[in-house]
């Protein structure tokens, strides 16, 4: 008679701390929460003398998106060992993955915040709200661009799967005495 095996205790599971791909649902929830906070803050504080929306965060988000997109293209080419490209350092790829995961979450939060601001500014009909719309809309686009570039970089850091014929050859070579 066989006994049912119980799952291993939580403390001994080796995959417990394993990092997986960024979940889109996490980014959506973070963006929606940031949009709600932005809507509440702007509706409560807009008439109390807040200065115009600055353009520096928009430019910063857009620059980060461009840099991460460039890193995605460069890293994918180096991982695939395309001609004329140096081999990639595995530690650099790990750092890029961490950067991509953090940037995707930060981009989602900024995009959500700017979405909340943009929504409220389009509801409001004052002159100050109309003047702040371009910065808020550009911030929303820059935040979305950062999320897209970060997800692209994360995907570019994946190791490509080997074709089936290479896997079969490796298995036969690893078992001596079998032909």
Image (cartoon, helix red, strand yellow):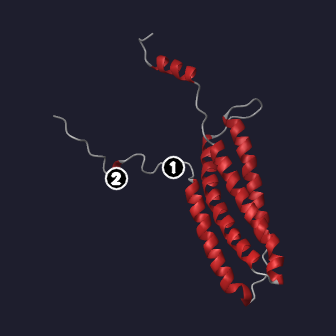
In the image, what residue occupies the spot 59% across and 25% down?
Answer: 163
Q: Residue furthest top?
A: 179
Q: Residue furthest left?
A: 1
In the image, what residue occupies the spot 71% across and 59% down?
Answer: 144
Q: Residue furthest bottom?
A: 48
Q: Point out residue 133 in the picture as x, y percentages from the top left corner.
A: 80, 73
Q: Residues within 10 Å of mark 2 (few under 14, many from 20)?
A: few
In the image, what residue occupies the spot 70% across and 68% down?
Answer: 115
Is residue 121 shown above or below 1? below
Q: Which mark is residue 19?
A: 1
Count of numbered circles on the image: 2
Is residue 16 shown above or below 113? above
- 45 vs 103, nearest the viewer: 45
Q: Point out residue 128 in the picture as x, y percentages from the top left corner.
A: 81, 82
Q: Earlier in the sequence, mark 2 or mark 1?
A: 2
Q: Which mark is residue 72?
A: none
Is residue 81 shown above or below 141? above
Q: Is residue 35 left or right of residue 167?
A: right
In the image, what residue occupies the spot 60% across and 37% down?
Answer: 159
Q: Point out residue 2 in the picture as x, y percentages from the top left corner.
A: 19, 35
Is residue 81 shown above or below 64? above
Residues at marks 2 and 1, CA–CA distance in whole angstroms: 16 Å
- Residue with the mark numbered 2: 10
Q: Quadrant of residue 36?
A: bottom right
């Amino acid at each position: 008679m066989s006994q049912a095996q119980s799952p291993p205790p939580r403390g001994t599971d080796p995959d417990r701390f394993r990092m997986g791909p960024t979940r889109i649902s996490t980014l959506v929830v973070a963006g929606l929460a940031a949009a709600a906070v932005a809507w509440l803050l702007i509706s409560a504080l807009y008439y109390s003398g807040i200065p115009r929306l600055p353009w520096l965060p928009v430019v910063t988000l857009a620059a980060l998106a461009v840099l991460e997109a460039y890193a995605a293209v460069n890293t994918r080419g180096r991982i695939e060992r395309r001609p004329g490209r140096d081999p990639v350092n595995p530690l650099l790829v790990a750092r890029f993955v961490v950067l991509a995961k953090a940037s995707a979450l930060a981009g989602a939060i900024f995009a959500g915040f700017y979405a909340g601001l943009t929504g409220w500014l389009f509801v409001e009909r004052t002159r100050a709200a109309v003047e702040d719309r371009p910065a808020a809309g550009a911030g929303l686009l820059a935040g979305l661009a950062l999320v897209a570039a970060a997800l692209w970089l994360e995907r570019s850091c994946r190791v490509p799967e080997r074709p089936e014929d290479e896997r079969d050859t490796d298995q036969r070579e690893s078992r001596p005495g079998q032909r």
